[in-house]
Amino acid sequence: MVNERYNRFKSNRQGTRPNYGTSRPKQHSSVGRVAAPSESNEPKLKIIPLGGQEEVGRNMTVFEYGQDIVILDIGMQFAEEDMPGIDYIIPDIRYLRGKERNIKGVILSHGHLDHIGAVPHILPQLGWPPVYASKMTLALVKRRLEESHLQQHLKSYEIKSANENLRFGNIKVNVFDVTHSIMDAIGVIIQTPVANIIHPGDWRYDLDPVTGKPTDFSHLARWNTKPIPSILMMESLGSTKEGHQISELDIFRTIKQVFEKTQGRIIIATFASMVERVSWIVSVAEQLGKKVALDGYSMKLNMEIAKKIGYAKFKSSTLIDIKRIRDYPDNKVVVVCTGAQGEDRAVLMRIANGEHRSIKLQKNDTVIFSSSVIPGNERSIQRLKDSLYRQCDNVIHKEIMDVHGGGHALIEDIKLLLRQVKPKYLLPVYANHYLLKECAKVAMSIGFPPQNISILDNGSIGEMTHQGFKISEQKIPIEYVFVDGLGVGDISHVVLRDRQILSADGMLVIVATIDGKTGALVGSPDIISRGFVYMKNNRLIEETRHKIKQILKGQNKQQLTDEMYIKDKIRNDIGQFLFTKIERRPMILPLLIQV
Amino acid sequence: MVNERYNRFKSNRQGTRPNYGTSRPKQHSSVGRVAAPSESNEPKLKIIPLGGQEEVGRNMTVFEYGQDIVILDIGMQFAEEDMPGIDYIIPDIRYLRGKERNIKGVILSHGHLDHIGAVPHILPQLGWPPVYASKMTLALVKRRLEESHLQQHLKSYEIKSANENLRFGNIKVNVFDVTHSIMDAIGVIIQTPVANIIHPGDWRYDLDPVTGKPTDFSHLARWNTKPIPSILMMESLGSTKEGHQISELDIFRTIKQVFEKTQGRIIIATFASMVERVSWIVSVAEQLGKKVALDGYSMKLNMEIAKKIGYAKFKSSTLIDIKRIRDYPDNKVVVVCTGAQGEDRAVLMRIANGEHRSIKLQKNDTVIFSSSVIPGNERSIQRLKDSLYRQCDNVIHKEIMDVHGGGHALIEDIKLLLRQVKPKYLLPVYANHYLLKECAKVAMSIGFPPQNISILDNGSIGEMTHQGFKISEQKIPIEYVFVDGLGVGDISHVVLRDRQILSADGMLVIVATIDGKTGALVGSPDIISRGFVYMKNNRLIEETRHKIKQILKGQNKQQLTDEMYIKDKIRNDIGQFLFTKIERRPMILPLLIQV
């Protein structure tokens, strides 16, 4: 493997480089440069990744040709660890303001929240353009809109088969089936007079599927023609991971083997969105005469939707209510639940903590994590595993058995896709910048011409004309739009910085009652602290009170009657005092009450 | 691989189980049960892991035989993400109170902070017992004590060779050389009349070292004798990772290859503690006629120490000051620095952000991350990589080339150690509980008898007598001892919870001036918020002010003069009001000022 990896490294060092645009992107810049006037009257095809801050284009991509706009996906990004209290982030759609009439349609590739989650926030702002998606995706979008009581506004069109031709003004769109970790995922072929864009969205190969035919994207090669070249937009999340993604059939076999050999109860935690896997888990249980209890709000809801639209095929009698599991012998019980990421109040955590109403863990239970670790959750999952290992003899996870495969393509999949689709141009997307560049290296390692690879940023404008593809010098300003509770976009960086300070060392409110005329201190200052030190009998608080008195005594009358001055003085001097004493920097809020 | 993994899974399901103690451990319990009186007069050998909360025994282990105590390591644990503002955690040593005279010595296995970091806090509390360690470890301990101006108290003994016999009352100790990611690591053989404990500390095999002989632990087999059996305490961090740890020679070869082929400057980020690796990086540079600039406080200090004690062998003229790198052609410059974990102010981050005084990144620079990702740092490292990939064509990391191997043993190493040492008993340690159990499974998979494996917790007492090994029913209460700035142990769970609340939704101070007699509101209440909503022109704050007035108006005179009641009322009603309005739960601090 080393040699092959080294060759990839070398292939990047031959002097040829992909096209990374002309200027270094500024993620937080608020001023875009104005582009030079267009050379011809033929409209350009513009490709603009708008959503997400680090994973380029994952949440939302705009395709614009003349007066026609088609949008792919309207998802949300989960908050990161330096954004305390933020629920999630939605795309910055300022670019679309004033262009609402041009938006001919929104296509949603699949039902994951990073692709549909911002629909309730953004569709209303865009004037409810029609939404095109497959059956499962539409069902999930409707559910998401119902949560905000907005479902009645939705104009939707269900894409029933890959053969449909959709028309959005001068843009035509065809779709194709894609394998991903959720059912009913589709890819799109965006057709314009200057290029055909092939975008599989999130994708993987399953060369060995549990049901259906192996993935084959060779049919997409026909979109690269002499007059109209094709542009492949390629998800690049797995571009540093060797090999092919593990086949779902392997996972199926491993889990089935565990089912056959296990004598006690089986508890499987997986992602609620893995509807297909949950379906075959239920089927396997059914074959072995076991009953299945689903637990977790989104897990149950997703399976209800899948059952309703005919995607989950098993007898209704196989499912039992979680409250009834004690009515069956241990070896007939399978529980499928959420919480494999160690989320605080999710089902698996409640089971582990002994707080679940119907499940008390037993030594002979088998607990399976059929999931991967989402970065940032490592520690929570370790603790959850510790707790489960203490209570059960059989805990199985990806580290020790193949009970999960991701929904994303790995290096060999990326190569195979390129070989099958044979595009003229390559735009790696849907990952951090560094992974896009690694995807470019993978492409170059199998001979893809570097000059035909371009790396976009969110807010970059990819421009396609008959002359070819280039990245515009103009860049659209993109900012984080934070959602916190019911507030959208009202959390500024100031508020976040305050939260970070508060969380690091807490805060101290100092209330000084002041004589309105002389500015002299009346009585003793009150101090309230939270998250700083434990207040009870704390000598430091007493010393701080004394220090405040000293500070105020040291001021002349003019200074004392200058409220701003006194507040600054208290903030700075007490801040310094506390840092010297205990090396902490709480937020200090001085309050002067005049009497 | 699947089959082998499955066999390991099955081997755990044959009905035989290791010894996990009699009661389910309670991590935060503060009351230990009292053990039954000892059966004989022969003293028991007690093994007590005291430090760390999740990784059993990693920070500190106590060995007690009669009136003699030997301590292995006094380290610190880094804070976790639900402990905002906490610098680190030190072992809870209440068990040793009153036993200070029995502590005959402290042995430090190697110089990493999780093994020596709590020395300045704990040695003074133990009355400065003598410290035994190898040259490099002692040098690092002295430096750590100097930071707290405590070095003059240290009584230290340098362990010069593996042949020394150390005596601590009735406990004898021999040491042996161990390969780890820091120089001069040692393992110990703790000898008592009832058992010989073999503890390699943190260890790995290097079957293909850059210099010196391949690791071989066969010589440890002789400590398992008929009258006195051996107990192997085995670090288990890698017990779910297949294969052998990658050899340092492979890393050496890969990095050397990069050095030889690279035309531009080379910037290598690694851990400051990897003194050996930094040494051979400098030597390779020297051979190729390149100059090396070290950057980063701890990197420079560690190399100074290594050079001083004769561990780093290269010409002094090979090292140049970072400020002078521009005096040399690019292809003669190597920078070795800290910051590979994406730490905010570390060297590599400053380079990436364009804030480094001497290094402005160039396209043809090669940046190497010779490091692993410490869980919790994934996102910061991704951002750092993004930033570097934007500026350089050649960024190399573990994902794409073998430029780092960890300091810990993997599954095949664990098996090899067991086969070489042939202990009677096995105690997996130095990892989360779940990994200790996986280590037990690995041992069972090669035929190690389950009844001779025991899993301890921090605070568990392993008891060895001539009758054999068992885990005592008594458990020592262990709590987190937090260090925050200069405060040690003064941060309670209340303070941490407050910090979590403050960080999630910020806070709101409500100051109401009240007529001392009637309790009626005087003027309009003041509201100060931080981390809640952006204050400027915020209508919500105005509405809140109005709501407070309403609340106070609705109270009768008796209620109004009851300060506690009014404060609770404001806290609850405004909390509810804000949640309805915006679904956030800031901390609310009502302040009543009587005039």
Image: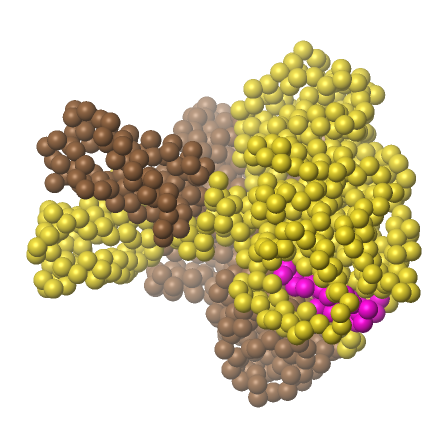
Chain colours: A yellow, B brown
- Please tell me in which quadrant of the rendered image residue A140 appears: top right
Residue under the image location 9 percent in, 62 percent down: A557
- In this view, B117 is above or below A382: below
Residue under the image location 85 percent in, 54 percent down: A417
Q: Is A207 positioned to the left or the right of A51 in the image?
A: right
Q: Is A47 positioned to the left or the right of B428 in the image?
A: right
| Residue B285 screen position, x and y as percent | 66, 79
- Please tell me in which quadrant of the rendered image residue A325 appears: top right
Quarter that holds the N terminus of chain A = bottom right
Say if residue A564 shows up in the picture.
Answer: yes
Residue under the image location 81 percent in, 58 percent down: A192
Magenta stretch: give its range.
A448-471
Q: Residue furthest top?
A: A327
| Residue A426 screen position, x and y as percent | 79, 62
Give whichever of A45, B371 is nearer the camera. A45
- Please tell me in which quadrant of the rendered image residue A406 appears: top right
Give whichever of B563, B108 is nearer the camera. B563
Residue under the image location 68 percent in, 69 percent down: A472
Say if residue B471 shows up in the picture.
Answer: no
- In this view, B30 is above or below A244: above
Q: Is residue A461 magenta?
A: yes
Q: Is residue B289 magenta?
A: no
What is the total number of numbered labels drawn onto the structure image? 0
| Residue B140 screen position, x and y as percent | 47, 63
| Residue B247 screen position, x and y as percent | 72, 60
Give whichever of A371, B105 is nearer the camera. A371
